[in-house]
Amino acid sequence: MQMKFTGLMARRMLVNFRVPAEVAQQTLPAGLRPKLVRGYAIAGLCLVRLERVRPLGLPALLGLGSENLATRMAVEWTQQRQQKNAVFIFRRDTASPINGILSEHVGYGVHHRADIHTCDEHGEVAISVRSFDRQQRARAIAQDAGSRIMRHSVFRTLDEAATFFRGGECGYSPAREFGRWQGVALRMSRWDLQAMRVEHAASSLLDTLFVGHAELDSAFIMRNIEHTWMPIGDLPLAQMDANASTRAGCSIRPAGDKPRQQLAAA
């Protein structure tokens, strides 16, 4: 069963790390490539507060709220000689028991249960995440910075960053079955991206994936945006042009296993 959902994205904070391209490539299935900005892959944490989320067509008063984390990286691939863009989501975590139970069954991928604590006031956002299975511990503290992007970021302007992240409206995250990633498209009523200054950011999963090669790059925030989610099917690995990928990727274990990476044969 696949369903469309709608609601309010009260807060979407993107905490970004730049990763050397050759390191990022080894965390992806064969056929995918990291999408690069000035030679670097962009990975990180997407920390989202959702409100009034309900199946499309139901009144808002029946909607639910939740705190969620997606650990992701921008990717691209070639399909029938055309470049496709998306976000590859290594793992989803949620504080919502309902999300944890239902998401995979309605086409949204596995959502792992986690304790997520937030403080969002006076222009500062502090979020901590600890998954029940102990595979993800993340923390971020950042302050509103308007249009002032962090120094040394690969992004030169807010418009450049907004264009880059708008290309990741489709996201693919692990299903329960090994080697399968379920896709979801995010449609937002508007894009209103603002920069943040990061005081602290860390993720145990990013440390595991990139073995110390992920360097804090930037952070952005969006607030109070009406949106719709819709399933788009599985990641089309079989349809990708194999000769367009510079290197073979890796095999990622099924959701719920320890996030260790195994290199596939080149």
Image (cartoon, helix red, strand yellow):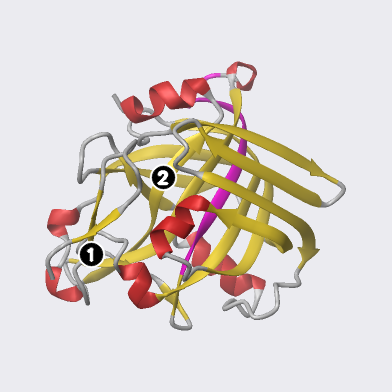
Task: Specify the amino acid type for callout 2.
Answer: Arg
Q: Percent position (x, y) of residue 64?
A: 59, 22
Picture layout, residue 107 above or below residue 252: above
The reply to whether the magenta stretch includes residue 46 is yes
Query: Which residue corresponds to mark 2?
Result: 91
* Along the viewing direction, whichever of 8 and 247 lies nearer the viewer: 247
Q: Which callout, 1 or 2, points at the residue further toward the start of the chain? A: 2
Residue at 62%, 72% (x, y): give it: 159
Farthest right residue? 122
Q: Percent position (x, y) of residue 157?
A: 65, 76
Query: Which residue corresponds to mark 1?
Result: 249
Q: Which mark is residue 158?
A: none
Task: Specify the amino acid type for callout 1.
Answer: Gly
The boundaries of the magenta stretch are: 42-58
The answer to which image quadrant residue 86 occupies is: bottom left
Residue at 56%, 63% (x, y): give it: 16
